[in-house]
Image: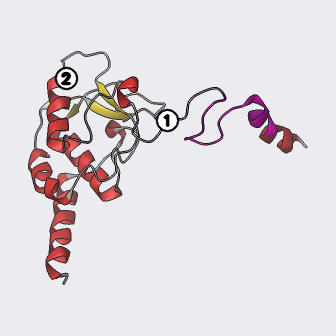
Amino acid sequence: MLLMKLLLVPILAGWPLAANAVLPGQPALAPNSAPSEYGDDFDWSRKGPTEFLDRLRQSYRAGQELPFYSVHGEHRGWVTEADVPQLLELATSTDPCLAVVSTLSSWLPDRPSTVGHEALYILAGFRAGKYPPELASTRWSGTLEEYRQWWQTHEARSLTRP
């Protein structure tokens, strides 16, 4: 009986039961709609990963209290195979930049990132099929060597396909 009450309370209170659920009286948001309402004003449909990295680098200010960029929604197909070589080159950069956080995250980064780390995070998004691949880039870890090896294997498979 207690379990049933615990399950019914959220339903009776009108709480959303899923990440994409909407509270009563609230408009439903289509995927990737009106991201600027959430602070995400990057043009995901017209600009690519290198422009996004430039934006992160140019928007960073030393001592910034909130050193992150909030991404609204998931961007599928935004990173293409053609972007990978340039992202691997940028992955060596130690230039400071804003970290990336999904608007779905309950945690906010308290430190900036680097262009290199964010380039690898974008590559992780390519591999995952969506960007951002996780809720916060500063809580994600991957190495340049890991992604170089992955790309060499990926390229070799591409060359042997008919």
Vertical placement of residue 144 versus 14, above or below: below
Quadrant of res 23? top right
**10 Å neighbourhood of mark 1: few (<14), some, or many (≥20)?**
few
Give the quadrant of the C terminus.
Answer: bottom left
CA gap, disc 1 and disc 2: 29 Å
Left or right of 147? Residue 104 is right
Q: Position of residue 68 (x, y in %)?
A: 30, 27
The amino acid sitting under disc 1 is: Leu
Give the residue drawn at x 16%, y 82%.
160
Q: Circle 2 sits on which residue?
A: 60
Q: Is residue 21 magenta?
A: yes
Mark toward the start of the polypeptide (1 vs 2): 1
Left or right of 78? Residue 55 is left
Q: Circle 1 sits on which residue?
A: 29
- Segment tinted magenta in the rendering: 8-24
Asked if the residue under mark 2 is in contact with the one under mark 1, i.e. CB atoms within 8 Å, the reply is: no
The amino acid sitting under disc 2 is: Tyr
